[in-house]
Image: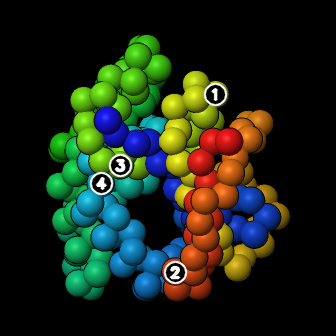
Amino acid sequence: MAKLVFGMNQSLDGYVDHMEFAPDLELFRHFTREAEGQAGSLYGRKIYEIMSYWDDDHAEWDADRRAFAAAWRKQPKWVVSRTLKSVGANASLIEGDLEGAIRALKVEHDGEIEVAGPDLARSLTELGLIDEYRIYLHPVVLGRGTPYFGGPRPPLRLVSHDRIGNAIRLTYVPA
C-alpha cells in the first residue's frame, strides 16, 4: 500500500511560494533523488500547472535540472481538478469522488506518492489520507502568501528532523 507524503518548501512564517524562494543545490538534488524513487505524484491543479514547466526542455538548464526533469517525466502523475479537461504526458485526471479515488491509488500502488499543493493537502488532511508531512523550512520570512496548512492543523507527532542544504526538514505523522 502506498504512503501519501505532503512535502513542500516553507518560509519561517509558514508560507509556500515558489516564486519567492527556491531550494539550494543540495536540496534540489535531494528532491531529484526523491522524485526518482517515488511511486508517483498527486497534484492539485495550480501546482500541476506550475510543475508542468518540467515537461519541456529548456536550453539554459544545467545537468541538475535535466536530471530532475527526467525523473519528473518518468513518474506517474495524478491531477485533481474540477476545471481541467486534459493533462499532459504520464498524467491522469482525477474528478468526482476524491476520497474514493485516493483510497484506490493507495491500494493499487506501493511506495511513496508525493502530495503537492496546499489546497489539495488540506482536503486530503480533512479526509485523514495523508500519512506523512515533510516541511522543508527555509530561512526566509515572507509575511504573506499561501500557508503550508490551508486549514486547521491536524494533531501531529514529530518523527525526525535533519538539515539538507540551507533548509531543515521536519517530518511529522498524524498523532
User: Which of the marked residues, 3 or 2, is nearer the chain's N terminus?
Assistant: 3
Residue at which label 1 appears: 126
How many C-alpha atoms fall within 10 Å of the one at disc 4: few (<14), some, or many (≥20)?
Answer: some
Q: Which amino acid, mark 4?
A: Gln
Look at the numbered disc 1 and give the secondary structure of its residue: helix
Residue at which label 4 appears: 38
Q: CB under 8 Å between callouts 1 and 3?
A: no
Q: Which amino acid, mark 3?
A: Glu
Q: CA distance from mark 1 to mark 3?
A: 20 Å
Q: CB under 8 Å between callouts 4 and 3?
A: yes
User: Which of the marked residues, 1 or 3, is nearer the chain's N terminus?
Assistant: 3
Look at the numbered disc 3 and give the secondary structure of its residue: strand
Residue at which label 3 appears: 112
How many C-alpha atoms fall within 10 Å of the one at disc 2: few (<14), some, or many (≥20)?
Answer: some
Q: CA distance from mark 3 to mark 2?
A: 20 Å
Residue at the spot 58% in from the left edge and 25% down from the top edge:
127
Please state the horizontal and vertical placement of residue 50, each as a whole percent of the image. Answer: 43, 53
